[in-house]
């Protein structure tokens, strides 16, 4: 969990540097650092639940995103308290797919936990790790979109990244309580291929539903229809 926040913190630092220098290289390094946090997010879930969710596979997607980023021209500018990203459709899509997959795996792991306190801890884990800032930033983006011109497609990733700072106040509390409120399974469980495929398909389905139905994701639909 700490490495997740280290990645997001470095991403924010590199965003500041990219605005100060207008450097494509610095900007792209920041994007790669940001999406790398998803590996550590999945890895933290595996450690917490003592269950394999093939977090190492995410490194392949992260590498492909990095490759695409460094081979492309990516435009950006500073707006208000965040960076407006004009060329991050691939980056944002993979980020969100991994984020959804993390949730699917977490709820799947929670379904197999019988201890009530541990089941509640799984929800606290999601909130403490990322969901609190995600919910608040989504509300801000939707409100901003309706009232003062926030661009859903270009602004939401950086707004969420900025809101992510809120999470750091909850992580120390969560980690200090964790040994007392969560019973970690002693036996390591390896995911079966069938369950993994189901999780992946469910992740894609949720991604498509969000892309087609919510204002927060409407830019994905437009990107596919009008590339």
Image (cartoon, grey):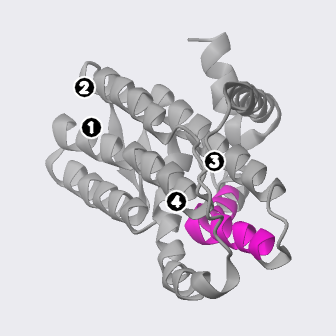
Question: Which of labels 3 and 4 is toward the front?
Answer: 3
Q: Which residue is mark 3?
A: 189
Span highlighted in magenta in the image: 118-138
Q: What is the x, y in percent for residue 141?
A: 65, 54
* Circle 1 Cα neighbour tier, 10 Å, few/some/many (<14 / 14–19 / ≥20): many
The answer to which image quadrant residue 17 occupies is bottom left
Depth check: give the residue in front, 25 or 197.
Answer: 197
The secondary structure that dominates the magenta segment is helix
The relative height of residue 191 versus residue 65 in the rendered view (above or below) is: below
The disc, 4 or 1, on the residue closer to the chain's N-terminal end is: 1
Q: Which residue is mark 2?
A: 70
The disc, 1 or 3, on the residue closer to the chain's N-terminal end is: 1
Residue occupying image coordinates x 36% and y 62%: 3
Q: Which residue is mark 1?
A: 28
Q: Which residue is mark 4?
A: 47
Find numbered disc 3 in the image and state the secondary structure of the residue it sits on: loop
Find out whether the residues at labels 3 and 4 contact each other: C-beta distance under 8 Å.
no
Question: Which of labels 4 and 1 is toward the front?
Answer: 4
The disc, 2 or 4, on the residue closer to the chain's N-terminal end is: 4
Find out whether the residues at labels 1 and 2 contact each other: C-beta distance under 8 Å.
yes
Q: CA distance from mark 1 to mark 3?
A: 37 Å
Question: Which of labels 2 and 4 is toward the front?
Answer: 4
Q: What is the x, y in percent for residue 40?
A: 43, 53
Depth check: give the residue in front, 143 or 139.
Answer: 139
The answer to which image quadrant residue 179 occupies is bottom right
The relative height of residue 220 versus residue 47 in the rendered view (above or below) is: above
Find numbered disc 1 in the image and state the secondary structure of the residue it sits on: helix
Residue occupying image coordinates x 41% and y 43%: 35
């Amino acid at each position: 969990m700490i490495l997740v926040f280290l990645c997001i913190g470095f991403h924010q630092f590199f965003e500041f540097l990219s605005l100060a220098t207008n450097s494509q290289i610095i900007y792209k390094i920041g994007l790669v650092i940001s999406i790398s946090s998803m590996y550590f997010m999945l890895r933290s879930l595996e450690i917490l639940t003592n269950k394999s969710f093939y977090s190492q596979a995410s490194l392949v997607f992260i590498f492909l995103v990095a490759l695409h980023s460094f081979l492309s021209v990516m435009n950006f500018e500073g707006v208000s308290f965040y960076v407006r990203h004009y060329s991050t459709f691939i980056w944002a899509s993979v980020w969100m797919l991994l984020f959804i997959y993390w949730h699917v795996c977490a709820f799947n792991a929670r379904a197999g936990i019988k201890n009530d306190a541990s089941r509640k801890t799984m929800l606290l884990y999601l909130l403490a790790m990322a969901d609190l800032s995600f919910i608040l930033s989504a509300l801000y983006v939707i409100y901003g979109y309706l009232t003062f011109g926030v661009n859903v497609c270009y602004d939401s990733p950086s707004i969420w990244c900025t809101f992510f700072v809120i999470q750091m106040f909850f992580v120390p509390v969560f980690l200090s309580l964790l040994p007392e409120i969560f019973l970690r399974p002693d036996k390591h469980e390896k995911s079966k291929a069938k369950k993994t495929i189901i999780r992946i398909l469910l992740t894609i389905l949720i991604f498509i539903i969000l892309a087609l139905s919510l204002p927060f994701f409407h830019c994905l639909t437009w990107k596919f229809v009008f590339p």
